[in-house]
Amino acid sequence: MSETGHAMLDAIRSRRSIRQYSADPVSDDDVRSILEAGRWAPSGLNNQPWRFGVVRDPKCKNTISELTRYREIIRNAPVIIAVFLDNDAGYDRVKDCQSIGACLQNMWLATHTLGLGGVWLGEILKNKEGVGEILEAPQSYELMAVLAIGHPKHRQQKSDRKSLSELVFKEV
């Protein structure tokens, strides 16, 4: 396997959800790199149905934070990125949602590779219309997730995974 291949697998294995951040700002260049990574995700028919709302403003973050029980994560993250599915750009619901997942994974891996930390917040989806209203998203935009991003306070997060024998049910 190539050195690049090993680096990618290492990034996948070492990435963790980071929920606590230092006060250091996230640079515009890093935010742009994270968005670029999302932009290059695969999508059915190359429809690229993702749309992004980037929020740094503390007042706006605070308003959005009131829509989730994980409010402190949003308030303390230097930047959050709301990832929407543009239903007008979609052509197949399942494929479009899978594309958004690939977009989010790319963004998350880019965040990790840049030395930043992030967490994918999904619980906020119970109030997805509220987030859309706060960000003045078009009606066709449906919130899929919010990424909170910042410089990690620490990196002692642990995680384990089920063995492949528990996950692979058939191999022919």
Image: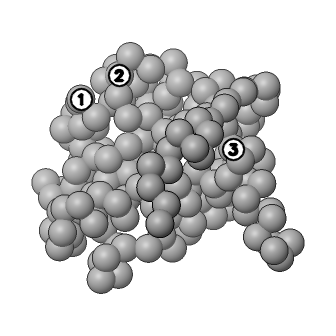
In which quadrant of the rendered image does the N terminus lie?
A: bottom right
Q: What numbered label is drawn on residue 126?
A: 1
Q: CA distance from mark 3 to mark 1?
A: 26 Å
The residue tagged with tag 3: helix, strand or loop? loop
Q: Residue at x 50, y 50 (%)?
A: 168
Mark 2 crowd level (few <14, some 14–19, many ≥20, 10 Å Cα): some
Q: Is residue 95 above or below residue 118?
A: below
In the drawing, does residue 119 fall left or right of residue 160? left
Please state the horizontal and vertical placement of residue 156, each as a whole percent of the image.
79, 25
Q: What numbered label is drawn on residue 68?
A: 2
Q: Which residue is mark 3?
A: 15
Q: CA distance from mark 1 to mark 2?
A: 8 Å
Q: Is residue 1 visible?
A: yes
Q: Residue at x 56, y 68 (%)?
A: 36
What's the amino acid at mark 3? Answer: Arg
Q: Is residue 103 above or below residue 120?
A: below
In the drawing, does residue 23 fall left or right of residue 142? right
The residue tagged with tag 2: helix, strand or loop? loop
